[in-house]
Image (tube, helix red, strand yellow):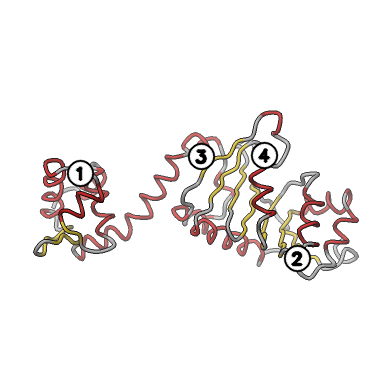
Amino acid sequence: MGDLTGVIFSSDKRKHLLLLLKSGPRTWEEIKTSLKVTSSGMLPQIHILENEGLVIRSGKDYRLSDLGMLIVYFMEPLVSTLASLDNNKKFWKEHNIGAIPFDLLKRFSELKSLNVIECAMEESFEPHAQFLNSIRQSSSVKGISPIVHPRYPQFFLDGAQHGKDISLILTNNAFNKIKKEYYPYLEEGLKYGNASLYVYHGDIHFAFIVTEHYFSLSLFFHNDVFDSKRDLVSTDPSALAWGDDLFSYYRVRSERVTSLEDSG
């Protein structure tokens, strides 16, 4: 057996075939159609995978061997992670992703179809339109933030008044700022049973929102400056599920605010 790492990752054709066969056997015609390959380009790659014991031919079908299934099981998350990082390479290089809890960072491959949304310079201190519209169209909103934008207190209060399920986690500094500068909004918002507010007694170096159909993540630069111009967004179900779990991670580690008199 040769160097399996080289066998798998030094050829896109071999890599894509292994991932294709993960979902079940394929005929030669199905392989050519799905991968858009020619016989002369693909057959030598199949022979290499057969010689390595990763792919087996059964009649007219090609399928993964047990060894092939094992390798692809561990290979798929890595390929997805590399693809996500490669699609936004400059963004990831400039930002601090270490602020995300490692338990969630290990599941980075679930953040599929991420796109970087960048607002114009003159709008860099305003929430971008896609962000606001997505929240308006949602019935459930979960968010985490260490910062306070002047538009947010009224915006989220309006959502609670219109029956949306609003759950927010703030850092101590963000909560104290809202309590000091937007007390009436905070007091009113706590009256709604469909709204909940939590305080996390620690540092959070990212901001994010997840709804039933939208995910948005904002990060800090490595120098601890918040990037107010660019957000990572996705509508992929796996990214939404990841966002729900990120919110749950911090919610169980946070203190719920039910009364301003008891909040210090």
Mark found first going from the N terminus, 3 or 4: 3
Which disc is residue 163 wearing?
A: 2
| Residue marked by disc 4 | 226
Q: Compute the Cα span from label 1 to label 4.
A: 45 Å
Q: Residues within 10 Å of mark 1 (few under 14, many from 20)?
A: some
Q: Mark 1 vs mark 3: give the one in front.
A: 1
Tell me if 112 is positioned left or right of 254 in this view: left
Q: Amino acid at mark 1?
A: Val
The numbered mark, 1 or 3, whose residue comes first in the sequence reads 1
Sequence-first disc among 1 and 4 = 1
Q: Earlier in the sequence, mark 2 or mark 1?
A: 1
Kind of residue at badge 4: Phe
Q: Nearer the viewer, mark 1 or mark 4?
A: 1
Percent across and percent down for residue 104 are 52, 57
Residue 15 horizontal/vertical position (percent) = 26, 48
Residue receiving disc 1: 37
Q: Which mark is residue 170?
A: none
Measuring from the top left, give residue 172's x and y in whole percent: 77, 54
Counting other residues with Cα less than 10 Å from the Cα at mark 3, is it few (<14), some (14-19), or many (20 or more)? Answer: some
**Residue 230 placement, left or right of 202:** left
Q: Is residue 220 left or right of residue 111?
A: right
Q: Amino acid at mark 3?
A: Trp
Residue furthest to the top in view is 121
User: Which SS class for mark 3?
Assistant: helix
Within 10 Å of disc 4 (Cα), the crowding (few <14, some 14-19, many 20+) is: some
